[in-house]
Amino acid sequence: MAVERFHIQVEEEVLSDLRDRLGHIRWPDQMDGSSWEQGTELGYLQSLVAYWRDRFDWRAQEAELNRLAQFRAEVDGFSVHFVHERGVGPDPLPIILTHGWPDTFTRYQKIIPLLIDPARHGGDPKDSFDVIVPSIPGFGFSSRPNLRGVNSFHVAELWAKLMTKELGYPRFAAAGGDIGSGVTRYLAATHPELLVGIHLTDIGILRDLLAPSGRTDLSEGELRYRSSAAEWIAREGAYMSLQSTKPQTLAYGLSDSPAGLAGWIVEKFRAWSDCGGDLGRSFTEDELLTNIMIYWVTGTIGSSTRMYYENSHTLPPIGRIDVPTGIALFPADILLPPQEWAERRLQIARWTSMPRGGHFAAMEEPELLADDIRAFFRPLRNKGRE
């Protein structure tokens, strides 16, 4: 199919079934005196589910999402859902923003207006972007893969075709975090001729991070980074291990129980954000539940976690990337690499240590991230017109 407009309209039967399930949760117990150290805290989740059942208004959130210009396009057999908002400025630069897990395209909902119309938000209209935010296959309103090998490399190939063949951009910018960082890096590695530059909020948990290394020239910072990564994976990596090995087993429970789905997702939003243990400092209940709802109404929690399996089992190696790269590190993110580690793998043109924010930077600190994206791409814009 050609590019077609898309409008979110969840069937009432789906919402009615959800209301029924939310009214009949079978709650587990929790150890006396424990909080979040063994996983999502019972009292918090009961409160969130009560809000979800009694006060959350999906139709209002649906209407807000439908204010975005949304489309679907057939790309190599996949129906790809994406937002495509045109920039307000003399010569907008196209940029594709890729989300991760456990978020959705709503990760970038707050930052879109800041990038398309900077003048309206105190910026320079010359810094405007055409913003494209696709949903990764297996997430949200894109189709669910039913074959092996749909990994970050494969998604990067889909994005290259979406941007050039479907949307007609000969060169463009790209940015992302989490899985979106990997997709963006593969785009730059395999199609450098298409990329003006890339902007990342992390460089991922690289496959070679814990592998034995014959290098003898690692800096003290790099050695500490490897050590802290190993400690983090041992302490916090259970979700990654399960999703990388047995995602199908996990999918049964999360697809059947909205409380289970919410518990699995909100724990990551709390652990990876700059909320100081209080989710309300970084996200509203409506923001959290809108993200969770997209997984629920599309039935994509199982297909989204399979991305971890495919990235662990079918992802090809990635070489050094020589496309200009901007890195913005937010202090509460999962792992903060030293600059020398990144420079071994990327052509770093801008390195920013942010004063606050975490893994979900575009949701937590959209103004800080938008400012850094504008500043990084400002000297690269002319390259996008060559």
Image (cartoon, rainbow, N blue to C red):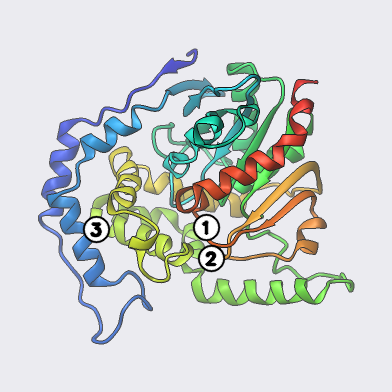
Return the disc, 3 or 1, that comes first in the chain's sequence.
3
Q: Nearer the viewer, mark 2 or mark 3?
A: 2
Mark 1 touches mark 2? (CB < 8 Å): yes
The 10 Å Cα crowd at callout 2, few under 14, some 14 to 19, many 20 or more, is many
| Residue at 24% over, 31% down | 10
**Residue to which mark 3 is pinned:** 259
Residue 343 figure quarter: bottom right
Q: Amino acid at mark 3?
A: Ala
- Looking at the picture, how far across and down is residue 113, in whole percent? 48, 33
Q: Relative to 131, does residue 327 appear above or below in the rendering?
A: below
Q: Is residue 319 left or right of residue 86?
A: right
> In terms of secondary structure, where does tag 2 sit?
loop
- Looking at the picture, how far across and down is residue 286, in whole percent? 28, 48
Return the disc, 1 or 2, that comes first in the chain's sequence.
2
**Residue to which mark 1 is pinned:** 359
Visible in this render: residue 257? no
**Residue to which mark 2 is pinned:** 332
- Residue at mark 1 to residue at mark 2: CA–CA distance: 7 Å
